Amino acid sequence: MNPESRTARLLGPPARGRFKRAGVVASLALVTASGVVGPATPADLTPSDRTAAAPDGSDGCRPHRPDDGRWCRGPRGPRGATGPAGPQGPPGQTGATGATGATGPQGETGPVGPTGPCVGIDAAQESADFEIRLALTGGRTYAGIRDQRAGEQQTLLWTDLSARPDYPAGGAAGLPCDVTVNAHNRSETVKRIKFDVITTTGQVWEAACVAFTTTHPATLNCADRTGRPKPWILVARQPTPDALNGGA
């Protein structure tokens, strides 16, 4: 009979268990004392060691055992879709008004503009029966007469002289720019009156009319004996520089 077997039977089951545990403790003490370290146990592994692959090809971790202190990193999943844009924030406050800049230099003087329309008026009264007006406005010349006799309305009656032939209306003649009246108090029933204009080119033009007091109210007639309107006439000799009882 094997001596070990006889010893085991003599000791019985409880004794054998105690004997085995004592042998294991003695073995561990011997290993510790000799400084020999065997393979690392699971508790001695660092987190990086715990993710090493096991001999069977697995990752060596058990994610369903949170109590053992180990974890597993799975593969990176695909990038998710971009979320919708958030709502626009409220507008910011308006900043303060900046200081006024310095005044810039004065610009050059612009060219002289075209001459505006001329206006003018003149009057004469050489008779107690009527008075005469000559008005220039809007490029047109108007002759007026007002009956001053008792019983008359004493309102001005106008005749457009710019509708007469040869009225200066531009070009070399220029445009009328001022007017004057020449009337003479004569005893005849027909009162001859002359109306003059000076143009923008310095020319002097004249139209002749007569005032009739045989009618009520008095009127102007600027037509000849045949009834045709009398034309404007460029007066003989025009004012010229340095003239002395002369002209052009």
Image (spheres, rainbow, N blue to C red):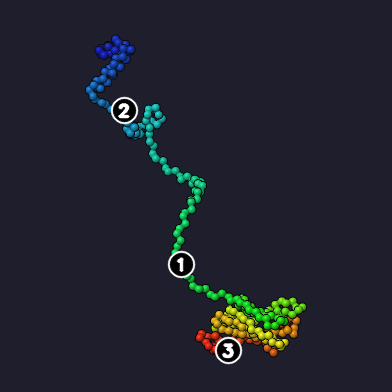
Q: Position of residue 78 (x, y in %)?
A: 42, 42
Question: Looking at the image, which residue sits at the far top?
Answer: 10
Identity, as a three-letter code, of the amino acid under mark 3: Ala
Q: Which of marks 3 and 2 is nearer the N terminus?
A: 2
Along the viewing direction, whichever of 29 and 140 lies nearer the viewer: 140
The dot on residue 236 is: 3
Q: Where is residue 204 in the image (x, y as percent from the top left)?
A: 58, 84
Q: What element carries label 2?
A: helix
The dot on residue 44 is: 2
Indicate which label's residue lies in the foreground, 2 or 1.
1
Q: What element carries label 3?
A: loop
Rendered view: 95 above or below 38: below
| Structural distance between the alpha carbons of marks 3 and 2 | 137 Å
Q: What element carries label 1?
A: loop
The dot on residue 107 is: 1
Specify whether 226 is left or right of 101: right
Res 25 seen here: yes
| Structural distance between the alpha carbons of marks 1 and 3 | 48 Å
Residue beneath the point at 34% across and 32% down: 47
